[in-house]
Amino acid sequence: METTDPVPDHRPQSTTAELKAEDLVGAWLLEDLRLTLRHRTVRPRCQGTLLYTPSGHFSATIHVSSRRLPRLGKSLGYTGTYTVERGVVTHHTLVATWPFGAGSRQRRWATLTPGDGSADLLRLGGDPGGSVQFLLAWHRITRA
């Protein structure tokens, strides 16, 4: 079900400065996606997976079930390598669909909340100063 909320602050509440690439390794399922466009927040129905490998590669795929965001299309994804520095995960894309571009760098402000077993929660947000704000919440389903 798609909902519209008041405009929240999409920036992670605290940036995990100690976050390391090996902390991300594993498979993640999309739990929540929030987009803020023109002071309006939308939570489209989505499903997605995010994979981080020990060798520094990643793959992200999201399927959007919402009819209210036709510009995103039904599925979007990108893959490549990743680096982590000061709580920011940078995805260096090799292959990508719109709105990402092959060869682009996608910076994600990250917060990792450890849990028991597969209860880890990873929040990835866009540039806090950007015109479009988004926050993706992922929960870990397995470690590599």
Image (spheres, grey):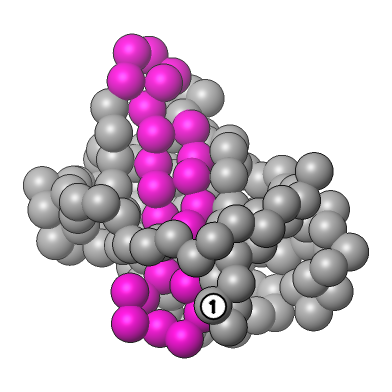
Q: Residue extending furthest top?
A: 116
Q: Nearer the viewer, residue 62 or 129?
A: 129
Q: Secondary structure at mark 1?
A: loop
**Region of the chain picked out in magenta, as a range:** 115-139
Residue type, numbered disc 1:
His
Residue drawn at 59 percent across, 78 percent down? 37
Number of labels in the image equals 1
Mark 1: few, some, or many residues within 10 Å (few <14, many ≥20)? few
Query: Residue 106, percent across and down?
Result: 43, 74
Query: Residue 105, percent across and down?
Result: 41, 79
Residue drawn at 11 percent across, 53 percent down? 17
Is 124 inside the magenta-drawn segment?
yes
Q: Is residue 40 left or right of residue 115?
A: right
Query: Residue 144, percent across and down?
Result: 42, 28
Q: Residue extending furthest front?
A: 6
Q: Residue extending furthest left?
A: 18
Q: Nearer the viewer, residue 65 or 107?
A: 65
For the question of whether residue 106 can be seen, the reply is yes
| Residue 91 picture quarter | bottom left
